[in-house]
């Protein structure tokens, strides 16, 4: 009884300890579910499939990974998927920076919360609604053709370009918000000091603004890169004949589950390597 009383008193005096004990169980359960599912995915990638019955044969073999890295089609799809994710990330960064600079440094302080809400509003809309809206925009005779027609041009149609444009639109808010936060927290005296020392706007951007905002750009890229790498619905709707790694996983999940698991391990490994690279920039502390 005395031990229980002392323990209760210790918990009452240490709110952090109480909070840690309360969060231990759900965090442990989440870790078991997440890491357990990844372990099952990795283990099943070493199984095989009976060619006659399509039944999974739980016999250890590295044939799936051997086929994955020796078949030219799989290699092309993997490289294309990584290239699309990188292209979406670069486009999001290029578009997000001026938008975030305006919302954080140029717009009136009273309007900045409204602008942030406007940036977040597309995230409240349905994913499929937004993708099908872009399908209408990029279709033959759609809004893209109507806007580019007077210039003698036409829209990109369905394909790899349409996929990159649509994914850029979908994940752009995830890049704007961290950059907006970093620019909003940028001390004014640093910019004033740079101007007093004779630095022009371009030099101030390169030497003062960019180094301080770069971790937030890297933090936003974690979202844009990972979400683009794992997407498979957008490319089915606006990608035409283009295939990404998510499409191959979806196509094999019923016919060849071990191969689908082997394919699914590729984006997991790529994202882990990307996170390790971003850790050096301090991006993970900006999430």
Image (cartoon, helix red, strand yellow):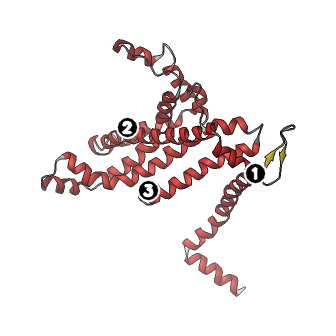
Q: Is residue 142 above or below residue 16?
A: above
Q: Is residue 141 above or below residue 237?
A: above
Structural crowding at the residue carrying mark 3, measured as other residues with C-alpha within 10 Å and reported as few (<14), some (14–19) or many (≥20) = many
- The residue at 56%/55% (across/down) is 272
Q: Is residue 91 left or right of residue 268?
A: left
- The residue at 51%/55% (across/down) is 275
Rendered-image quadrant of the N terminus: bottom right
- The residue at 78%/37% (across/down) is 255
In the rendering, at what x and y percent does residue 164 appear? 49, 33
Residue toward you, 110 or 123: 123
In the rendering, at what x and y percent does residue 226 appear? 54, 46
Which residue does the numbered mark 3 point to in the structure image?
A: 283
* Mark 1 or 3, nearer chain start: 1
Q: Is residue 223 above or below residue 35?
A: above
Q: Secondary structure at mark 3?
A: loop
* Mark 1 or 2, nearer chain start: 1
Q: Secondary structure at mark 2?
A: helix
**Label 1 – label 3 distance at C-alpha:** 33 Å
Q: Give the residue furthest to the bottom.
A: 2
Structural crowding at the residue carrying mark 2, measured as other residues with C-alpha within 10 Å and reported as few (<14), some (14–19) or many (≥20) = some
Label 2 close to label 3 by CB (< 8 Å): no
Which residue does the numbered mark 2 point to in the structure image?
A: 95
Q: Is residue 136 left or right of residue 44?
A: left
Residue toward you, 110 or 260: 260
In the rendering, at what x and y percent does residue 198 appear? 12, 52
Which residue does the numbered mark 1 point to in the structure image?
A: 44
Label 1 close to label 3 by CB (< 8 Å): no
């Amino acid at each position: 009884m005395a031990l229980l009383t002392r323990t209760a008193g210790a918990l009452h005096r240490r709110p952090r300890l109480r909070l840690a004990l309360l969060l231990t169980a759900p965090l442990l359960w989440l870790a078991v579910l997440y890491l357990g599912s990844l372990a099952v995915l990795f283990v099943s990638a070493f199984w095989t499939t009976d060619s006659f019955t399509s039944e999974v044969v739980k016999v250890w073999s590295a044939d799936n990974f051997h086929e994955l890295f020796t078949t030219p089609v799989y290699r092309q799809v993997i490289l294309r998927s990584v290239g699309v994710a990188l292209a979406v990330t670069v486009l999001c960064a290029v578009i997000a920076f001026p938008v975030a600079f305006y919302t954080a440094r140029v717009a009136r302080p009273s309007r900045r919360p409204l602008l942030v809400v406007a940036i977040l509003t597309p995230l409240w809309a349905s994913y499929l609604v937004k993708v099908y809206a872009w399908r209408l925009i990029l279709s033959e005779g759609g809004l893209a053709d109507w806007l580019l027609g007077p210039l003698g041009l036409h829209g990109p149609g369905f394909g790899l370009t349409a996929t990159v444009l649509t994914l850029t639109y979908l994940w752009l808010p995830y890049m704007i918000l961290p950059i907006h936060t970093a620019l909003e927290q940028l001390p004014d005296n640093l910019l004033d000091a740079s101007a007093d020392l004779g630095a022009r706007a371009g030099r101030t951007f390169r030497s003062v603004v960019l180094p301080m905002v770069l971790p937030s750009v890297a933090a936003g890229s974690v979202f844009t890169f990972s979400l683009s790498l794992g997407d498979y619905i957008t490319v089915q709707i606006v990608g035409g004949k283009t295939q990404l790694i998510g499409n191959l996983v979806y196509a094999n999940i019923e016919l060849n589950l071990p191969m689908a698991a082997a394919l699914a391990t590729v984006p997991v490994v790529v994202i882990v390597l990307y996170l390790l690279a971003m850790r050096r920039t301090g991006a993970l502390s900006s999430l």
